[in-house]
Amino acid sequence: MSAPTGKGRTVRRWLILSLFGVYFLVPMLASVEFSLRDVNDTHSLVSWKKLLTEPGLFETLTTSLWVAFGTVALTLILMVPTVSWVHLRRPKLRKLVEGISLLPLVIPPIVLVNGVLVVFRDVPEVISGTPVILVLEYVILALPFTYRALDAGLTAIALPTLVEAARSLGASWPAVLLRVVVPNIRSAVFGAAFLNLALVMGEYTLASILLMDTFPVWTVSTGQSEAGVSVAVSLLSLLVVFLLLFVLSMVTGRRHRQVTAPIAPTPSRGHS
Amino acid sequence: MTANSITAEAGVVHPAPAAVPARPMPKRVAAWVTGHIGLLPFLAYTGIFLGAPVFMVVLGAFQDNDGVFTTDNITAAMSDQFGRSFVTSIELSALTAVLGAVFGAILAQAVLGTKPDGLVRKVVSSASGVLANFGGVPLAFAFIATLGSIGIVTKALTALGLDIYAGGFSLFAFTGIAIVYVYFQIPLMVIVFTPSLEGMREQWREAAENLGATKWQYWRHIAGPVLLPPFMASLLLLFANAFSAYATAYALTTGVVPLVPIQIGSLVSGNVVADQQNLGKALGLGMIVVVAIVMSIYNWMQRRTSRWLG
């Protein structure tokens, strides 16, 4: 966008950006300061050192990572074939699948968990008493992102042509999905996987009501006794997720240009 | 492109609609199943893990503890105490949605003025993704470090002679929670509103300018009317987002501000009397109704949007 008013506009834009920058940075810097506090107005690394010896940190982090891994895997196994099938065979059903996929936006997690408690009260302990139930429900919470990312990815490629080419060369359906479709929508798959990961690493509502010891639940319970430690952990987790997303935006930004530019200039209509 | 081959294939499994009514029931079911085979895992999964829980909430809202039909829970959910918490939740969501939408739109517009592949864009889009999706618990702690009673900003203001806590402010009361919510509403607005801003064509502005329109006239008659529906749609999404938020509120309030999600949480986890589970479901049903109303207005707005910015 070229600005006819030139300099004045550029100055105003950077002024706005810096004001927002300050607004968003203050709580982060405050967290850094807070996590470095020691007794009697001194500062030290005591909270950060304690963090490593705090009971439960690694256990809960491991649990959350496993849940994240399971959620991403199950989401992709369920949604990649579904969305591909709808695109290929029943474009008319796209509205239906989209509608169902966006439903979790209408159901607040606190309400969903209420029903989950009733429905899965009598299922075997293996499912309801372990993080398996979290994996199963996080797939639902992640549906809106997942659907939009995959739908946008599949819209941008010439799916029928690719699939027919692969089929006529004798590829089986699983081979078509794994070796033709997935590589072509790689950035959409990455995007969906990543948003799932961010969601799982931050989800508190379901985990706490279902009494699962995940990383966010641990953060809150630790915060009640050790404010410094849990501010440090919060800061760390925000930074890690930010860095991952940032790297992802670098990678997909480059791929996006390469893959979709010559085929179809589809505007990205999706959100969140 | 290859529509012929698709319809040909589809025709095999999906007979003409005219033939359907004449068939016996089992065959129709079988035909439907083969026609939707690729959708079955998805339908089964969402049915079990989304449909069933929601159904149980709606059912439970109309049952007493012995499973007998009653409207007592609904009446209780609309009574003074809980009615007030619905009002508080709606006020908080509306306030933070408006603030988030206005500031988010300003930020999104400013970011679009920077280089398309520049660092600013990448940082803003990544940060938005983190804060909007992941925020919850970590944000609450960041704000305790900032504006809590011993937070650095609170201390700095006290040193300057402005003791905000003595002045009645508390991070754990309505205003405090609103400040934290706005912090994750702005990034969400940036995410959902940027595509609409990107859809604005440079030619529209040029055309208006060539016809002698002032900047105000361009915004009043062209950009404003085109952007208003997506702006309102985003605002509604922000409302729904704040309305359902639980983690941030829980980590911040310990029941000081009566918000519906917090009350459901305490009813469910048995902090109150154990036999009030179904009251929690009635409150849940109330939340679904509010969000559903908001989202259907959102959908209608979205359809108006795509007319111009599709």
Image (cartoon, rainbow, N blue to C red):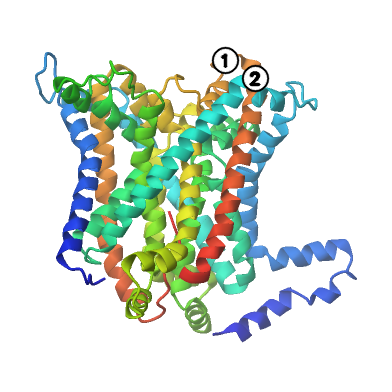
| Residue A270 in sight in this render | yes
The residue positioned 10% from the left and 23% from the top of the image is A43
Task: Give SS at disc 1.
Answer: loop
Q: Image height check: is A15 above or below B259? A: below
Q: How crowded is mark 1: few (under 14 residues within 10 Å), some or many (20 or more)?
A: few
Q: Which residue is under mark 1?
A: B272
Instruction: Answer with the quarter of the image where residue B192 lies.
Output: bottom left
Compared with residue A62, is residue A34 higher up or lower down, i.e. above or below? above
- Which is nearer the eye, B40 or B255? B255
Residue B245 visible in the displayed image: no
At horizontal 45% and vertical 70% (from top left) the residue drawn is A181
In this view, A107 is above or below A233: below
Question: In the figure, is residue A191 to the left or right of B17?
Answer: left
Residue under numbered circle 2: B276
Q: Residue at x 60, y 30 (%)?
A: A117
**Image location of residue A114, percent across then percent down:** 59, 31
Locate residue A232, reporting x and y percent. 23, 30
Q: In the rendered view, tell whether residue B166 sits above or below residue B116.
A: above
Quadrant location, the N terminus of chain A: bottom left
Q: How far across and down, in percent of the image, does residue A130 sit?
A: 50, 32
Q: Mark 2 lies on which chain?
A: B
The reply, left or right, for residue A115 in relation to residue A45 is: right
Quick check: marks 1 and 2 in contact, CB under 8 Å?
A: yes
Which chain is disc 1 placed on? B
Circle 2 residues within 10 Å: few <14, some 14–19, many ≥20? some
Gap between marks 1 and 2, in whole Å? 8 Å
Residue B2 percent across, percent down from the top left: 56, 84
Q: For residue B99, what is the image quadrant?
A: top left
Element marked by disc 2: helix
- What amino acid does circle 1 point to? Val
Give, as a three-letter code, the residue at label 2. Gln
